[in-house]
Structures are given as structure tokens and as C-alpha cells.
Image (cartoon, rainbow, N blue to C red):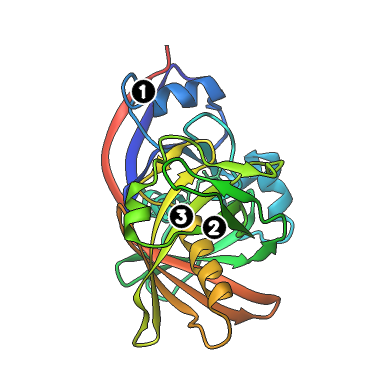
Amino acid sequence: MPTTIEFTKGHGTGNDFVLYADPNGDATLTPAQIAAICDRHFGVGADGVIRAIRSQNLPEGRALLAEAPEAEWFMDYSNADGSVAEMCGNGIRVFTRFLVDNGFATLETGDTLAIGTRAGVKDVQRGVDGFQVDLGRWRLDRTDPLVRVKDVDVPRPGLGIDVGNPHVVVALADEDELIGADLGYAPQLDPVPVEGANVELVVAHDPLVREGVGRIRMRVHERGSGETLSCGTGVAAAALAIRHWAGRGAPDQWRVDVPGGRLGVRMFAAEDGEHVALSGPAELVYTGTLDLA
Ligand SMILES: N[C@@H](CCC[C@H](N)C(=O)O)C(=O)O
């Protein structure tokens, strides 16, 4: 284990990450080290840590390589509390930027980069204002808990949606309710999902659809990280939930405004069922050296 690590700070719509390259898997951080790095007062400060490791050097990655040998790199994602998550929609775009800018991978316009994750292999392409990622097949998770949010007066029904990681989406009445919700406290879910869940609060714009694009606002409380300025998989889940509630005729293209910016979501038919794709910016902000001692 090295005593120092070169890291890069990056973000996608304000969802921020500490990234480091560990191609051979020599620098596995403990959950306590990850939590210390993510601490906003005593550490670098981030919503999560992303390790770039060659898929062949991680058991989960080796399992993917059998079916997708092109997935050379694996996004090893941890939340701010040190827990491991299956997927991160903002993280995978920032991870792609990190790989490309550091010469670990190339990605020309129109090409696809396959990246290993704990939710399977995800295909990333360059987009208009950053990158777009095919999050793959999604599914309704029928547990649908009742959600109690601090400063939202009555509990609301949530819709469980799995986009590789678990989400519960809650529709609020209006902007005032969205702004007034206190996400400094974790929303209480009943029943409590076994694996936990990211919780998205959403409101529709008026009108909901303009020029064929659905428009919503969202805030999020992330499993393992608390309230964040954005959550890519959460944005996809929110658009899927609103389309589900809106019913027949609702669009397959969505624009989602989060406190940290704007992301795009698109649902499309693929050979194995309907997929959901996410697009948006990915920025690298600065580099530094972590002293693990
Ligand atoms: N911010 C991410 C999601 C990160 C993982 C999440 N907190 C979980 O535990 O599932 C995103 O952009 O998708």
C-alpha cells in the first residue's frame, strides 16, 4: 500500500468526487479512509470516491470481462460514508473524463467506451455538453414505501425504481414544498428497503411537457452521502417515475433541473428491453496529493 495517492477532484452538476488511478489494485482504501477523505471539514470533501482500476484486478471486474472483454476499466465507487455503491450516473461521466484526460482511454465522437461497474458494463459516448451513458435496463421495484420527509407535512407514497442502484421517488405538490423540505435529515421509509435507497423529491414544471421534452425539478438525499447537489441515476429514476405517473402519451425525453445544474434523460428501446440514458457535463477541477498517514 502506498503512503501517498495522487488524486483529482471532479464533479458532474455539483455531485463531486475524489478520483484516483490504481490500475493494478495496489491502493485499496478502507471505508474509514474514504469517509475521512470525503469529510468536508477535515478532508478533501466529496460525495464519493472513485478508484480507476483495471477490471482484471478486481473480482467483480473479472466476472464482467468474460462477457465484455472491452471493459478494460472498472469504476470502483464508494459513497462518502465509505459504503460501496453499484453505480453512479454523474460519477461515470466524470470517470470517463478522468480516463480520457489522463490518457488511460480514448473516446472519439461517435465511439463508445465500455466501463465496468457493480451494476454491469455501461456504454459511454461523448455528448453535446459532456458525456452520455446508457444506464441499461431499468425496473420498477414494487416495495413502494411511504416516505416521511422533514418539513413536508404528511408522509407521501414513494415509487421504487432500480436503475442499477435503488431509488425511491416522491412527488411533491409544488416548488414551495420542494424548497422547504429539510434533507439534512434522511427521509424515513416504511418499509425500510433492505439495501437502503436514494430518495428523490420531484415536482413537475408548468407545463410539464414543452416541445416534446418533459421538464421536472428534483432534490435528492443519497444513500451513504446525504443531500447532494445532483444524482445522475436519481435523475433517471425521477424522469422514469414521472413518466410512469403521467401515463400514456408521456414523453421519452426529459430535462431535469437539480440544485447543481441540468441533466438530460432519454428512454429508448433496445434488444433486451427499454433502456434509460443520462447526459450531462463532467468537469475535472484540481489535482493534489493525499497523505494516507
Ligand atoms: N450520485 C450518484 C449515485 C451514487 C451512489 C448512491 N449514493 C447509492 O448509494 O446508490 C449518481 O450520480 O448516480
Cβ(mark 2) to ligand 1 < 8 Å? no
Specify the farthest residue to the top: 293
Residue pointed to by mark 1:
290
**Whole-number angstrom distance, CA of label 1 to CA of label 3:** 35 Å
Q: Look at mark 3 in the image and give the residue it sits on.
A: 201
Q: What residue sits right under mark 2 in the picture? A: 169
Outermost residue to the front: 153
Considering the image in quadrants, where does the C terminus appear?
A: top left
**Earlier-in-chain disc, 2 versus 3:** 2
Tell me whether circle 2 and circle 1 mark residues in contact (CB < 8 Å). Answer: no
Q: With respect to residue 44, does 230 lie above or below?
A: below
Give how far across and how far down residue 168 sits, in percent. Answer: 58, 54
Q: Which of 122 and 181 is in front in this view?
A: 181
Determine the image quadrant of residue 76.
top right
User: Which three-letter amino acid code belongs to the residue tagged 3?
Assistant: Leu
- Residue 149: image tag: none
Is residue 101 visible to the viewer in this orientation of the structure? no
Relative to 198, is 137 above or below? Answer: below
Instruction: Estimate the x, y position of residue 161 in percent, counting from the top left.
Output: 62, 60
